[in-house]
Image: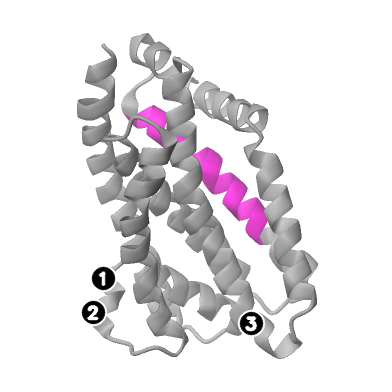
Amino acid sequence: MRLLNALLADMHFQLKQGFYFVYVAIVVMYLVILHYLPEIVKPVALPLIVFSDPSVLGLFFIGGIIMLEKSQGLLQIFVVSPLRTSEYLISKMLSLGLVSVLATIAITLFSGYYHVNWWLIVPVTLLTSGIFTLCGVLISAGCRNVNQYLLKSIPYMLLFVLPCFSLIGFPYSEIFMIVPPVPALKLMLGAYVNEVTLIESVLILLYLTLMNYVLFRWATAVFEKRIVFEEI
């Protein structure tokens, strides 16, 4: 019940702060871009756009959310509430993950491209969103305002995103698959062009699930040490 209430509260907060309206505007912008692209490039353009939603947007949004909660005194309320840190973080992951999945579905359906494996694109989008949300939590732990967070997140974004270019024509190495966004994007590309095997899909989903768990445990410890105890 606590988790459900936290999730509803997060969704209400994000709606009140205008995050959902930003998502809608971005989805419309993506659809306009896709409308003018040749059909032949859509199988590559679509997964790249879908990937940018839980990655770039998710990473920046979670930082903005936590900084807003800190400035509005909501973190102080959280500290003295019965809500656990793990429930707080899961709520953030689910609320942003749900928006990412809905945006992915909307972009794909309204783009007019129907050769997509939904059994892959939905879970990989959700898991990718979780990874970047948790990374955002880790980054925000040492920040005091949004500007500081944005500056601090740039190196992490480059570290995560640059290896992904190896999948679209740049020099590729299997070692890049260690970086979670790389296998995530590879699975997204495979979901749109149906060029990924069942075994490879399962292995990537398991790896992304493992990374979510590792980052979740890490983010929980850091959040309690750097934010919760500072608010007490």
Residue underneath mark 1: 178
- The crowding category of the residue bearing disc 1, from other C-alpha atoms within 10 Å (few below 14, some 14 to 19, many at least 20), is few
Residue at point 51% right, 43% down? 61
The magenta-colored residue range is 86-104
Of mark 3 and mark 1, the one earlier in the sequence is 3
Image position, residue 194 (x, y; %): 57, 84
Q: Is residue 20 left or right of residue 184?
A: right
Q: CA distance from mark 3 to mark 1?
A: 24 Å
Circle 1 SS class: helix
Q: CA distance from mark 1 to mark 2?
A: 6 Å
**Residue 180 appears in the rendering:** no
Circle 2 SS class: helix
Above or below, 220 against 184 in this view is: above
Mark 3 and mark 1 residues within 8 Å of each other at the beta carbon: no
Q: Is residue 156 left or right of residue 164?
A: left
**Magenta segment includes 222:** no
Residue at point 73% right, 71% down? 33
Residue underneath mark 3: 43
- Residue 208: quadrant of the picture: bottom left
Q: Amino acid at mark 2?
A: Ile
Image position, residue 18 (x, y; %): 66, 35
